[in-house]
Amino acid sequence: MKKVLILSGSPRKGGNSDTLCDEFMKGAIEAGNEVEKIFVAGKNIGYCKACYACKDTGVCLIKDDMAEVLQKMLDADVIVLSSPVYFYSISAQLKAVIDRTVARWLEFRDKEFYYIMTAAEDEKHTMDCTLECFRGLAACLEGSKEMGVIYAKGVYERGEINGTPFIQQAYEMGKGV
């Protein structure tokens, strides 16, 4: 059994990438894992101010929900990062979480990463920068391994993801954790 943390970076609860997170979660639970999904937009997470007060203590001066999220990230064996593509990059909500890991980034060890991306565009290359943002975090964390990527293309309006092969892909990826 693994501890799986899903960080849903969609600003829309029930949006396309959030729905894929739910499918991943369903599969991972059925496979016997302990799974938690955090809807990042529902948390109070401020932006990193680059004051580096956290450098020696690991404690951020900003008192918000990030300390709790960061501890859950550290405790997880598996981290799922999910975001819609916004101007070829990730959502601001998820970017704030990634930047705030700076307080304890040296404590991360041997995490397995899965990436879920959704985009209105139908071209895979529109997700390149989004994927590089995800990979950029993992590259900074000791022993990280990329385990899977979902490129959900051609979905824009809420619910368009339903009935696509991406639903089954997310479920199967979760089941394979």
Image: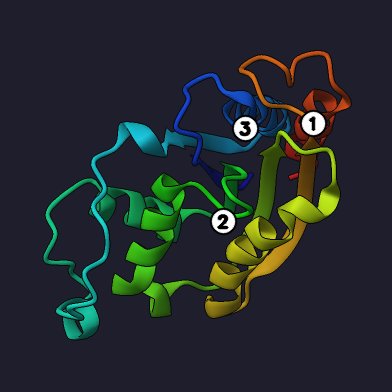
Q: Earlier in the sequence, mark 2 or mark 1?
A: 2
Amino acid residing under circle 3: Ser
Location of residue 94 in the rendering, given as x and y in whole percent from the top left corner? 45, 49
Q: Which residue is mark 2?
A: 77
Location of residue 164 in the rendering, given as x and y in whole percent from the top left corner? 84, 21
Is residue 148 depicted above or below 51 in this figure?
above
Q: Nearer the viewer, mark 2 or mark 1?
A: 1
Q: Secondary structure at mark 2?
A: loop
Residue in front for this viewpoint, 144 or 88: 88
Disc 2 versus disc 3: distance between alpha carbons? 21 Å
Q: Residue at 40% across / 74% down in the picture?
A: 105
Residue 36 left/right relative to 86: left
Q: Earlier in the sequence, mark 3 or mark 1?
A: 3
Q: Residue at 17% across / 78% down in the picture?
A: 51
Q: Residue at 83% across / 38% down in the picture?
A: 122
Amino acid residing under circle 2: Asp
Pointer 3 local density, CA inside 10 Å: few below 14, some 14–19, many at least 20: many
Label drawn at residue 17: 3
Residue 167 left/right relative to 54: right
Label drawn at residue 154: 1
Q: Secondary structure at mark 1?
A: loop
Is residue 34 depicted above or below 46 in this figure?
above
